[in-house]
Image: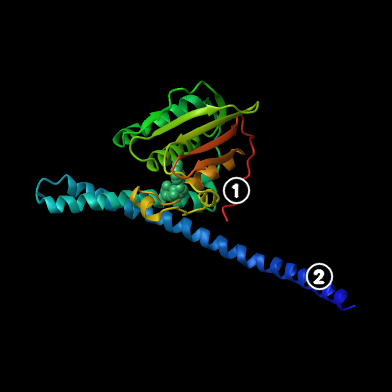
Amino acid sequence: IMAGLGLLALIVATIVGHILSGKAMVPLKAAYEKQRQFAADASHELRTPLAVVMASADLLQNDPSIKSPFLKQVIEDVRDEVKKMTKLVGDLLVVARSDNKALKLKPSKFDFGAVVAQTARLMAPLAEQKKITLVADRLPKAIIHADEQKIRQLVLILVDNAVKYTPEGGQVTVEFRKAEKGKVSLAVADTGIGISPEDQEKVFDRFYRVDKARSREMGGNGLGLAIAQEIVNLHQGDIRIESELGKGTTFIVTLKTKVKGKTKPLNMI
Ligand code: ADP
């Protein structure tokens, strides 16, 4: 009887717990929504003053009456920080926008291979600076129906990371992988520092950085992969990681060649 009563108590407690947590979910969701709206508004409002500061710093930089090397350096530092902040604010706006304006797809038909090669090439100067071999010229033609601008952003995030987290003399390879019919698979592989299995689960979280100091030094804010994941989800695609610490990392993105007209934006909460 005692065991039966215990079991009954457990069942009742579980049911009550479920009901309570169900009720608690409503205000919790509203609170998240408020927070998200606040982040969206704050980042939107910060854009204009940042643009003003940047324009002012540009003005100072070009002012011939400023001759002191110290002041010149100060102005340069201000510009660097404002640039970083502008990027952060822009990224924040993408992940926080509650009206999902930034997250709606504008699909069109384009050559995925050409877009990937072009985008990867944007990183060539940075790769060269670090003596990294950037291989992105073996991409065949692949016509897909997707949001070209967002696909460019996605490729840029992955190639930028690959270059950022690969030490001097390494290699970054951007290529297609074999995929099922009706799909394309893109691999961005590097010979860099790698990501541990525990961190592989977390790197898509907003603001998550394995090594905060290193990431900040590289100009990172921990939002890149969250945005990448969002773009992939919007396209009903898939993104995964293959990595070994100290050896390198490969991000593999698989997309349908034709995205469906109606897409449900991922709930960023
Ligand atoms: P960040 O702006 O810090 O680069 P991301 O969201 O793009 O932010 O990436 C999150 C974290 O994942 C990075 O801080 C880094 O620790 C790790 N990471 C991302 N890409 C790579 C890579 N190719 N190799 C090793 N670590 C990576």
127 sits to left or right of 255: left
The residue located at (15%, 50%) in the rendering is 72
- The dot on residue 179 is none
**How far across and down, in percent of the image, does residue 174 sit?**
46, 30
- Way the structure is coloured: rainbow
The three-letter amino acid code for the residue at tag 2 is Ile
**How far across and down, in percent of the image, does residue 5 sit?**
86, 77
Q: Relative to 8, is 125 above or below?
A: above
Residue linked to disc 2:
11
Quadrant (top left/top right/bottom left/bottom right) for the C terminus:
bottom right
249 sits to left or right of 169: right
Residue linked to disc 1:
266
**What element does badge 1 sit on?**
loop
The residue located at (53%, 34%) in the rendering is 147
User: Alpha carbon of mark 2 to alpha carbon of mark 1: how far?
Assistant: 34 Å
The residue located at (53%, 31%) in the rendering is 186
Q: Residues within 10 Å of mark 1 (few under 14, many from 20)?
A: some
